[in-house]
Image (cartoon, rainbow, N blue to C red):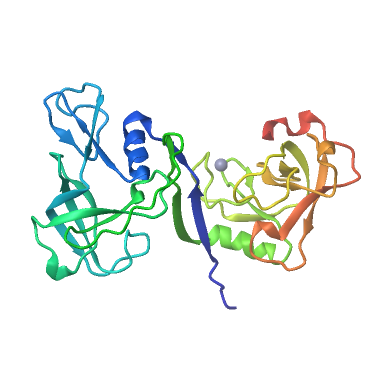
């Protein structure tokens, strides 16, 4: 018998938006307009990029000052093979640039030939043609003696108070022995749980060990394809990444014989008819795959509702 390795791509993504606060908001608003602003502390030092509190005294920052657009490279590192997501696709340098008028340096990309790179070189900010209030509105620095691209004006809008900060990570997930066994069962239209030898609870999807007792679960227990809706939620609001068309019912289905409910979808009925205690059965897709999505949904069956007393311990 050949063993198919059950691995799957997995994308973890959150479409966060972050609020900027007044200082960073003003800095980003200026970048969108094609200017660079720093902040002046009580002792007269100009910090760029700006900080929200005076690093020496902790006082609020209230004084803003325009700096640049030219500056001096204080140090750099060469990026010979840029990777996706880096500021430039051709070889470039990350440089600390002390903008004229500032006392601190900011880190950014420097577009120039490696032979031209030298600490102390004069550089100039180049702004992106399309700007939306992000640090990338400042596209890169270039040697100051090269002609600067003309600044493309963008419409003056309200001040920047938020920006998108999506989190995106791609994994390859290996199912592991217990889950792989469960998923291979699905290819045979089986819903198999596992029993804890200590507390006798039957878990589905099965776990390799009992979360209550901490012992290995070794006994595979075939479960019924019928069960009881113990609780549910009607999803009426669209959201990013949604697979089903709302409204639909997501429900905890306690399969007959199991001790934990399975989160799935209830279909083939009006969402307003879904209720606690409703009896349902699994409906399979035609093209079975080793995933719980091979159960298309659970549909109502012609059985009296289960009493709350019969499943209340599993809600
Ligand atoms: Zn246990």
Vertical position of residue 208 compared to residue 32: above or below: below
Residue drawn at the location 16% of the way across and 49% of the way down: 71
Residue 177 drawn at (x, y percent): 53, 61
Residue 233 drawn at (x, y percent): 71, 37
Ligand 1 shows up in the quarter that is: top right
**Residue 256, image quadrant:** top right
Choose between 149 and 48: the one closer to the eye. 149
158 relative to 232 in the view: left or right: left
Q: In which quadrant will I find the N terminus? A: bottom right
Residue 93 drawn at (x, y percent): 21, 61
Choose between 215 and 236: the one closer to the eye. 236
Residue drawn at the location 18% of the way across and 36% of the way down: 47
Residue drawn at the location 13% of the way across and 53% of the way down: 73
Choose between 72 and 233: the one closer to the eye. 72
Residue 306 drawn at (x, y percent): 83, 35
112 relative to 287 in the view: left or right: left
């Amino acid at each position: 018998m050949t063993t198919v390795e059950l691995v799957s791509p997995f994308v973890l993504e959150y479409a966060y938006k972050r609020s900027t606060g007044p200082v960073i908001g003003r800095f980003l608003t200026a970048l969108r307009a094609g200017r660079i602003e720093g902040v002046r502390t009580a002792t007269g030092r100009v910090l760029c990029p700006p900080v929200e509190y005076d690093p020496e005294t902790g006082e609020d920052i209230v004084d803003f000052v325009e700096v640049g657009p030219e500056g001096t490279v204080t140090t750099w590192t060469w990026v010979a093979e840029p990777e996706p997501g880096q500021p430039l696709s051709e070889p470039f340098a990350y440089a600390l640039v002390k903008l004229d008028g500032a006392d601190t340096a900011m880190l950014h990309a420097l577009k120039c030939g490696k032979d031209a790179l030298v600490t102390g070189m004069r550089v100039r900010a180049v702004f992106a043609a399309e700007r939306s209030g992000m640090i990338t509105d400042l596209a890169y620095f270039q040697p100051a003696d090269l002609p600067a691209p003309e600044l493309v004006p963008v419409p003056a809008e309200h001040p920047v108070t938020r920006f998108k900060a999506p989190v995106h990570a791609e994994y390859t997930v290996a199912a592991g022995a217990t889950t792989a066994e469960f998923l291979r069962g699905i290819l045979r239209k089986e819903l198999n749980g596992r029993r804890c030898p200590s507390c006798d609870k039957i878990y589905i999807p099965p776990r390799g060990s009992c979360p209550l007792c901490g012992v290995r679960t070794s006994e595979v227990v075939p479960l019924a394809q019928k069960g009881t809706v113990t609780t549910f939620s009607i999803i009426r609001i669209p959201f990013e990444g949604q697979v089903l068309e709302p409204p639909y019912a997501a429900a905890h289905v306690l399969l007959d014989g199991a001790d934990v409910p399975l989160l799935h979808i209830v279909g083939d009925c009006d969402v307003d008819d879904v209720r606690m205690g409703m009896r349902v059965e699994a409906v399979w897709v035609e093209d079975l795959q080793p995933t719980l999505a091979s159960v298309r949904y659970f549909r109502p069956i012609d059985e009296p509702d289960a009493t709350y007393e019969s499943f209340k311990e599993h809600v």
